[in-house]
Image (tube, helix red, strand yellow):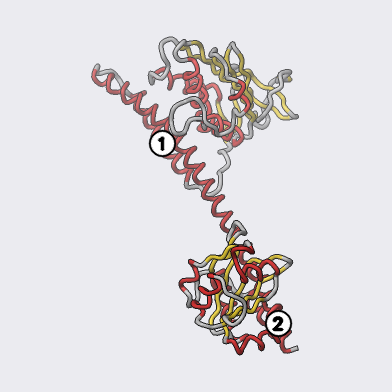
Amino acid sequence: MQSMMLVSEVGRTLARQESEAGLLEAMVRSARVLFDFDNTVVLLQDPTGQMLVGAPGGHNARIAEFAIPLALAKGGQIAAAAQARRIAYIGREGAPLGLAEEQLLRMLGTDSMVCLPLVAGGRCPGVMVGGVAAWQVPVCQKRERFLQSFGVQAASALETALLEHGQARRQLASVAEEYREASRRLLHEVNNPLAIIKNYLSVLDSKLERQEPVATEMSVLNEEIDRVGQLVQGLAELKPQAANARVIDVATVAGDVVRLFRAGQFVPANVDIATELDEGARLAEGDPDLLKQILVNLVKNAVEALAPGGGRIAIVNRGQVHRERKLYVELAVTDTGPGLPPEVMAKLFSAVQSTKEGAHRGRGLAIVHGLVTKLNGHIACRSGRNGTAFDILLPAPSGASGAPALSTRALGSV
């Protein structure tokens, strides 16, 4: 009865520990009090499950560098005890000692030791090794059931702590990866307004030299600098922010993007860029800045696809369409380039390596897809020998009127 009460109290004490280090210290302290161990160390399985390694802490600083293979042929009596889930009593007067046992006895400063496997639910996350004098071994053997019960309580608390620690580590790794991916997207997207700023500075320099008006160029520079600021600010947001619920004038945004590319000397002389806009259905729901970011990415890709042979790029508004009982405005960015190869089409909106140069190549379309999703829209791609078209559906404003045509061409969202 006394042993049962002690074990129950030990379990409550261990469960109250808030950290893995605190738990290990409580285990060692309890073992010393209950079993009169002179010194105690804990060995835990490493992540591979192939080794027992010393848990740092306590008065044995060297234990953190100690490791025992769990293979029976190499790990000796301690590995055998862990594998068999049975208590082992090891001393200089017994069976010949291996190197690991000799090292542990020297660390513990005793001539004998008790190796207690920590077993819970058939699993053994580690062992506790307590140093004792030779005359204490028979006393420990008489209390073996108490030792085993203590090992179960310690193992249960240890497994809970390790599980929580593993979850915290995985969450931290997930957050770190999300931040790295957000940083990569930011660097990719910042390159677009920075390239625009660079080109417009060149245009500005030429106009100032000729003493021509530069109000348009200054306005563009201000807008793009503001866009860089917004992109950088977005990286600091811990949670993705929903797109601003505004009305987008699709024709105005498309016209601004075309003028941006024409005036900024982005488009080679052999590339024609134009808009084909339906004036009757030019309003969509969402954030104009996000739509601009989408179109800049797609037009930039189209310009690169047409180099060096040239061709035509168009931003086309095809009017309103119904999809799944919702009304959308359909917008397309088309080019007359050579089309996309099948292997690119297979992973079109994934962040993968492309044939472009640069550290952030292959991310543009993944970003575009994310931005369209943020606008509660859909995007799909059609590509062949006659060119490529990216078709975008944007939600029409609530209460939008008109006679929308039912789209007979499937637009699969990705």
In the image, residue 163 sits, relative to residue 282, either above or below, namely below
Closest to the camera, between mark 1 and mark 2, is 2
Q: Earlier in the sequence, mark 1 or mark 2?
A: 2
Examine the rendering and report whether any part of residue 409 can be seen: yes
Count every numbered label the image shows and give the total: 2
Mark 1 and mark 2: span between their CA atoms? 73 Å
The residue nearer to you, when weighing 170 against 406, is: 170
> Residue 220, can we see it?
no
Q: Position of residue 29 (x, y in %)?
A: 57, 81
Q: Left or right: 92 with respect to 145? A: left
Residue 356 location (% of width, % of height): 47, 25
Is residue 356 rendered to the left or right of residue 169?
left
Q: Quadrant of the N terminus?
A: bottom right
Crowding near pointer 2: few (<14 within 10 Å), some, many (20+)? some
| Residue 160, placed above or below residue 287 | below
Residue drawn at point x = 32 percent, y = 21 percent = 203
Task: Please determine whether, in this image, residue 34 is positioned above or below residue 51.
Answer: below
Q: Position of residue 17 (x, y in %)?
A: 59, 74
Residue where numbered disc 2 is placed: 144
- For label 1, the residue is 226
Of residue 237 and residue 24, the one placed in the foreground of this image is: 24
The residue type indicated by label 2 comes to Glu
Q: Amino acid at mark 1?
A: Asp
